[in-house]
Image (spheres, rainbow, N blue to C red):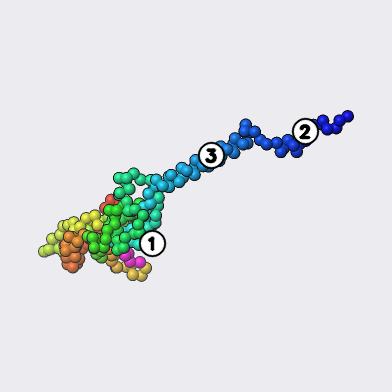
Amino acid sequence: MDSSEGPASPLGARLRRPGWRDPKLLVGVLMIAAAVVLGAWAVSAAEASTPVYVASQELTPGEQLDDDHVAVARVRLGAAEADRYLPATDPLPPDVVAVRAVGDGELLPRAAVAATTDLHVRPVAVPVTEAPSAGVAEGALVDVWVTPEADDGEPSAPRLLAERLTVAEVARPTGSFAVGAETVVHVLVPTDTLPDVLGALADRQSVQVVLVPGTATAP
């Protein structure tokens, strides 16, 4: 009996070179091709996105900005849309301040920042007669009303002194100092309104701060 004509060796079967129709080979080729396509798409998407500045915290008008106030995000924007936001291709300009409230995580619009010399508002501390609502906090908008002292016993009608002023800070009395103490609301007043506001405060007229509906922020 010729023992050399026995069945093929299992080791030989395992070492046989796979053909191009081998399912495992086809799956491997497809996976490599998919990885190449995905990598090319990721590179293309990164090149097509635009780096812009985004607020890393809530920004208040009048607040001077630096690198601690902003982060960089890459977003896909059209040409017209990209012009609305401050690009992060250059460092943040020096001596730049926020001119309107910007929320945490919001893209930083060009119109929301300006040089210090171009800022047309000034912070004014307004002691209020009655404590404002809890929604009157940093970033909210308020109207300021004054009531002149009574004349000849006749009550005076309140009048609107300034409207839609941005709140920069609220100092509410706490603890043992709360009884009888005034709340002070720091508001940003346009320079052309300053004489009226400062005049009313100098006369110690009764002042109230009224929240503009829909602009409340967390205290």
Residue occupying the far top of the picture: 1
Q: Which residue is mark 1?
A: 68
| First along the sequence among labels 1 and 3 | 3
- Which of discs 1 and 2 lies nearer the camera? The answer is 2
Q: Are marks 3 and 2 in contact (CB under 8 Å)?
A: no
Residue occupying the far right of the picture: 1
Give SS at disc 2. Answer: loop
Give SS at disc 1. Answer: loop
The disc labelled 2 sits on which kind of residue?
A: Ala
Taking the image as shown, residue 100 lies to the left or right of residue 194, namely right
Q: Would residue 137 be seen by someone viewing this image from the given angle? A: no
| First along the sequence among labels 3 and 2 | 2
Using the image as rendered, state which of residue 152 and residue 30 is in the foreground.
30
- Bounds of the magenta span? 169-174
Using the image as rendered, state which of residue 64 and residue 81 is in the foreground.
81
Q: Which residue is mark 3?
A: 33
Q: In the picture shown, does residue 179 fall above or below 107?
A: below
